[in-house]
Amino acid sequence: MMTTGEKMAKEQDRNDDENDETDTVEAFLTYAQLFEFDGERLGDVPIWQQRMREIAQHLPEETVKALTDRMRHAAPGELTDYHAFSQRYNLTVSEKKLLVSLAGGFSVPDHARRTGISVNTARVHMQNLLDKTGAGGQVDLIKMLLAG
């Protein structure tokens, strides 16, 4: 039989677990809202916000934490200073757009389709990005971008 103190401690542990889970879901939503789907930023579409919350609440907490960590590293926009990076390496507007797409997890052909340019033009932009930054490939380029 549990004492009143043990019952209170167990209840507090349950409340702490619920708060940790809420914090994990909120962190997940913060990063998920930065990404785009079909050209719409998820944070700008209320139904997507609700759907992402439902998904996060039904996944194991460790999975949500892992997804949040991956999104944190790949998140476009607010978390990365594209303007400063573009100025440092003298990137054109088109090269910067490709950089944002790459950081958002899109491939060069995906970027071409999304922006209405040919894949060959996108590849030229990619080569220019690599030449201007000295990056050895797309992964190195993204690492440089995230490092600031």
Image (cartoon, grey):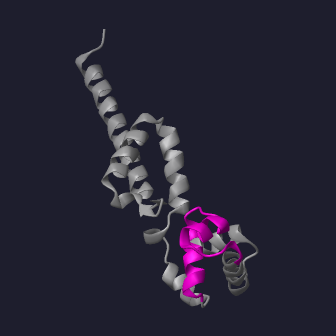
Looking at the rendered structure, the number of numbered marks drawn on it comes to 0
**Residue at the (43%, 70%) spot, across then down:** 78
List the single residue furthest toward the top. 1
- Which residues lie in the magenta part? 91-120
- Would residue 137 appear left or right of 37 to someone viewing this image? right
Where's the C terminus, which quadrant?
Answer: bottom right
Give x and y (percent) for residue 76: 49, 67
- Would residue 61 appear left or right of 92 to someone viewing this image? left
Q: Of helix, strand and loop, which mostly describes the magenta segment?
A: helix
Give x and y (percent) for residue 23: 36, 47
Q: Is residue 92 magenta?
A: yes
Residue 103 quadrant = bottom right
Please name whichever residue, 133 or 101, is drawn nearer the observer in this view of the structure: 101
**Residue at the (32%, 25%) spot, across then down:** 10
Residue 93 quadrant = bottom right
Where's the N terminus, which quadrant?
Answer: top left
**Residue at the (67%, 81%) spot, across then down:** 125
47 vs 143: above or below: above
Q: Is residue 141 magenta?
A: no
Please name whichever residue, 53 or 60, is drawn nearer the observer in this view of the structure: 53
Any part of residue 102 in sight: no
20 vs 26: above or below: above
Give x and y (percent) for residue 36: 46, 61
List the single residue furthest toward the right. 136
**Residue at the (34%, 57%) spot, across then down:** 45
List the single residue furthest toward the left. 4
- Would residue 86 appear left or right of 119 to someone viewing this image? left
Any part of residue 112 in sight: yes
Give x and y (percent) for residue 6: 30, 21
